[in-house]
Amino acid sequence: MAVTSAGSEVPVARTGAGGGNGQAHAESAAAAAAAEKASATRAWATRLVVVGIVLAALNLRPAITSLGALLEEVRDGLGMSGTLAGLLTSVPPLCFAVFGSLAPRFARRFGPSAVVCAGMAAIATGLLIRPFLGGTVGFLAASGLALMGIAVSNVLMPVIVKRWFPDRVGSMTGLYSMALALGTSLAAAVTVPVTDALGGSWRTGLAVWAALAVVAVVPWIPLARRRGADPAVAGQERAAAGREGAATGREGAATGRKPSAAPREDEGMRITHSRTAWALACFFGLQATAAYITMGWLPQIFRDAGVPAGEAGVLLAVTMAMGVPLAFVIPRVATRLSHQGPVVVALGACGLAGYAGLYFAPAGGAWAWALLCGVSNCAFPLALTMVGMRARSSVGVAKLSAFAQSTGYLISIPGPLLVGVLYQHSGGWGLPIALMACLMVPQIAVGILAGRDRTVEDEVAAKAAAAPAGA
């Protein structure tokens, strides 16, 4: 043995008697076998992550859209007023705002995979027990448990994708988005037929979705045990970060923009000093308001107009399914434009047309109104795209995303509740639909502001530079 400068012993190849070559060959074979085993383990884990992501995404909306399909039966079964039903449809954005903000802290302590695993378990538990707790309070509490699992998983899915697939973020995000839209529309379409097939009880029809969440727990259990980051994954992340920095430099040279500020400056950036950040947060909040009103109340609007319950659920499924193809198309169109205002206006116009149809002829043109509302609800991928375009650095994107989503979900909380109050006190859908149309107008306005070709770093820096002169 020989001693290195670090004080550790390393084997020295021996000559003579032929022992050195045999030992070296054995060590080389052992190293190759270990490397092959590690590669096979990483490949197995990667495939498991793909399955886990798809199953998790499928479970991120059925708790909401399955309830929308059976909301009338739930209200009758629990003796729930229209106001309380409106509160129920406001719970999802509230949970997303509150519990979603805690997800990064949980991930740092326990690891993202473990938190997603716990989230899937919370969804399964909440969906299983909420129909059988025997009252409105218990139903709301169990719904909150399921929505807590959805909230933390929703926030951490992009983290999982970035960690395991740094070179395929776009394709994996597309797969995740498609699975999410599929789960949303599937729950809306089949909840009523499944309920009828299982005996007609709304309690069984809601609880059956717990089975899908139980299946989603399975792939995350072994992943949760891999607490440390896979060395290969960490290496890919570092390589991707290097490529991102090079791409930022090339983009700056091509566009004439100055390079982004140093990370330490971005980390201290006051995002609330940016008008674009506020406009984007309001746009996110208003589009979320429209989405949750649609998911919670659209089937009831159709049913009150005389559309059969099963068809009303399918109409909601059609609305949600529009997000599958458009989630790929809209971001590509938006990134080719210097100003995303035209896309904002087009989506808003579809929303206004859909609401007008629901107001004047809800049953006569039900399929057309469902399609138009579905197109309008694709403001969500547009908002996420603009988050990435309105900041230059990755730190700026992270701060803008956190601010826009947390503030936006808080903004969206009163909308579904107010719709329920108006529905109960007016006895019809005229006023609620008028409210939905009125909210679309400021959504278009702030969306146009958020779509301007500028960055939050520039706005914050300009305000900081102007502060001494103003003082």
Image (cartoon, grey):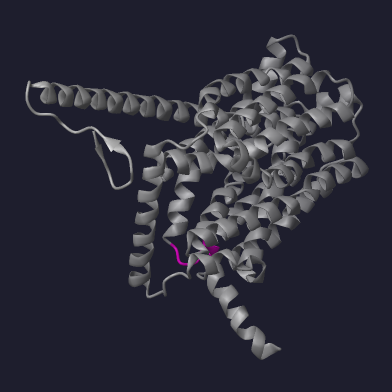
Drawn side of residue 282 relative to residue 228, left or right: right
Report x, y in % for residue 444.
64, 61
- As for residue 133 lying within the magenta part, the answer is no
Please state which of residues 412 and 329 is positioned toward the viewer in this rendering: 412
Magenta-drawn segment:
337-342
Drawn side of residue 176 relative to residue 356, left or right: left
Check the image and report above or below for 161 versus 450: above
Residue 365 can be seen in this image: no
Please state which of residues 88 and 145 is positioned toward the viewer in this rendering: 145
Seen at 64% across and 68% down, the residue is: 270
Quarter holding the C terminus?
Answer: bottom right
Dividing the picture into quarters, in which one does residue 267 lie? bottom right
Report x, y in % for residue 230.
42, 35
Q: Main secondary structure of the magenta part?
A: loop
Dividing the picture into quarters, in which one does residue 103 lie? top right
Report x, y in % for residue 204.
74, 15
Check the image and report above or below for 220 versus 362: above
> What is the count of numbered marks?
0
Seen at 70% across and 43% down, the residue is: 96
Residue 433 can be seen in this image: yes
Report x, y in % for residue 419.
82, 45
Dividing the picture into quarters, in which one does residue 113 lie? top right
Seen at 51% across and 64% down, the residue is: 391
Drawn side of residue 274 relative to residue 30, left or right: right
Quarter holding the N terminus?
Answer: top left
Please state which of residues 228 and 300 is positioned toward the viewer in this rendering: 228
Drawn side of residue 2 relative to residue 306, left or right: left
Check the image and report above or below for 342 versus 170: below
